[in-house]
Image: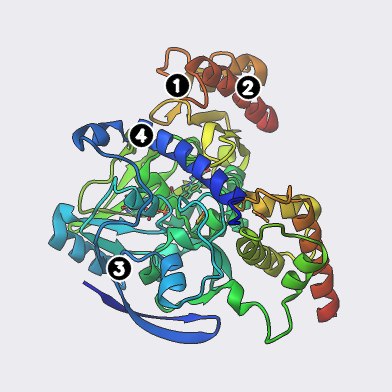
Amino acid sequence: MKVKISLSVNGKSYERMVEPRTLLVHFLREELAMTGTHVGCDTSSCGACTVLLDDKALKSCTMLACQAEGHQVTTIEGMANGDNLHPLQQAFHEEHGLQCGFCTPGMIMNAADLLSNNANPTEHEIREALEGNFCRCTGYHNIIKSIQNAAAKMSAATV
Amino acid sequence: MICDFRPIQNSAFKIQNLFFEKAELQFSNILNQKKNFKFKNMVPSKVNYHRPSNIGEALELMSKFGDECKILAGGHSLIPVMKLRLADPENLIDIAGIADMKKISDNEKSITIGACATHADIARNEAIQKHAPMVAKAAGMIGDVQVRNFGTIGGSIAHADPAADWPAVLLAADANITIKNAGGSRTVDIDQFFKGLFMTAVEEGEILASISIPKTEFNANSTYVKMPQPASRFALVGCAVAVGGGMARVAFNGVCSTPFRDTNVEKAVVGGSSAADAATSVADGMDVMSDHFASAKYRKSMAAVYAKRALGEVM
Ligand SMILES: Cc1cc2nc3c(=O)[nH]c(=O)nc-3n(C[C@H](O)[C@H](O)[C@H](O)COP(=O)(O)OP(=O)(O)OC[C@H]3O[C@@H](n4cnc5c(N)ncnc54)[C@H](O)[C@@H]3O)c2cc1C
Ligand code: FES
Ligand code: FES
């Protein structure tokens, strides 16, 4: 039996009827047509599906859409402000933090969680925070540099 | 030409296959019952979803549905298992939003952790960091950031995965588990809680409500170390030790199918042996697990190595 859920995605409220077994990632991709959030492994391992739920990083293949009822979801589509890229997006662009780009939305959302708790992380802290996100192209090196670059941009902007 | 360079998907499929292999080992009983069962990539079976607003309502729903329902907390064990269709409950009772069940309260003699407190909540709780450092440390070592943000302590111990991190820590901490049912509530000593592979003292129709950690000298001087499985971070060997006030509690997970306290090692520590000497007898005579990540012999020797390290930190 379908149930009604209402939740906010990237600041906009949505109300939809869903089957309770619908995973949040499928809800975002298929129901809301926001395909920026990727499915890599579908087994909670790779982090490609990472979104923020109330500002906390979540693997959206491991939660039912129902469980997000009443919560605020942020996806990669919600990061840029109009034509202005989010500092993390800008930094991934500048530091070549991506090659094929499949892991990038998840990397950026997880990095957003990290920077909201720790504005100036060390390289080690960044590596630890990325434990649940796999990249098969970049060797992580430029991803770390991108996050450091974004941290610097974001702290400069708040001073 | 179509580019078929999809590195992350390909590696994800490899990991998925490993995961399925592990699941096949763990769930071989169920699989033998469901003949011709093949692991596939899928979504859960049809299910009804309920969100009670307090624990009383949750218990009512549970008595109504009997064995046709399952509690859903963080979902970080249950949803993966439902996606593999190793679990196909008809009804899910989501307790994650019950505010009372998420509280961590710092009392005079103990710290009480609500079953729905997340691993991340526990890792950053200052009272826990001070009075039972191994509890905060273990919380911060579970899975990855995303798992710690949503997985709960109650869900983990109710699930009782032999490779989970909480069991050894709570055994070493001499924790008490409060379980609620339609008739009221009861408290179970942690030493009586784990009954075997995926089996605990929580009965059908019951909810694990909270975990209480006594403020003792041994808990104030405690640590947890683990040898993680490199991909999932589950424990191939996990060892929690708490030493103080003339007592020692030393417990393991990942080593045998049920987490256990090693009383030989505890006696040696209390009797004045060094960390290295006390650790030599770890898991003697126990039925140590063996799988494609670590043979029984390797696991047993790693258990001794990690016990020595943990004891070295607190002795
Ligand atoms: C990628 C990944 C890596 C992980 N790595 C680790 C790791 O390194 N170490 C580790 O220990 N764990 C690890 N986990 C498991 C994680 O800690 C889970 O969060 C935890 O095991 C289950 O908690 P949950 O709240 O998600 O429970 P759920 O999945 O919601 O529930 C699990 C089971 O417990 C039952 N249940 C839940 N709450 C209650 C309750 N209050 N009363 C009675 N029954 C209840 C449910 O019915 C279900 O059967 C990992 C998980 C993932 C996805
Ligand atoms: S698709 Fe969710 S973790 Fe890989
Ligand atoms: S850029 Fe290709 S997987 Fe990360």
Disc 4 secondary structure class = helix
> Label 1, label 4: how many angstroms apart (C-alpha)?
14 Å
- Please name the amino acid that badge 3 sits on: Pro
- Please name which of the two marks, 2 or 3, marks the residue nearer to the observer: 3
Q: Are the residues under marks 2 and 3 on the same chain?
A: no
Residues marked 2 and 3 touching at CB (< 8 Å)? no
Its colouring scheme is: rainbow
Q: Where, by quadrant of the figure, is residue A1 drawn? A: bottom left
Disc 1 secondary structure class = loop
The residue tagged 1 is B290
- What number is the disc on residue B24? 4
Residues marked 2 and 4 touching at CB (< 8 Å)? no
- Please name the amino acid that badge 4 sits on: Glu
Residues marked 1 and 2 touching at CB (< 8 Å)? no
Q: Are the residues under marks 1 and 2 on the same chain?
A: yes
> Label 2, label 4: how many angstroms apart (C-alpha)?
29 Å
> Label 1, label 3: how many angstroms apart (C-alpha)?
38 Å
A88 left or right of B259 in image: right
Crowding near the residue tagged with mark 3, few <14, some 14–19, many ≥20 C-alpha atoms within 10 Å: many
The residue tagged 3 is A20
Q: Chain of mark 4?
A: B
Crowding near the residue tagged with mark 1, few <14, some 14–19, many ≥20 C-alpha atoms within 10 Å: some
- What number is the disc on residue B305? 2
Q: Give whichever of discs 1 and 2 has the lower sequence position.
A: 1
Q: Give whichever of discs 1 and 4 has the lower sequence position.
A: 4
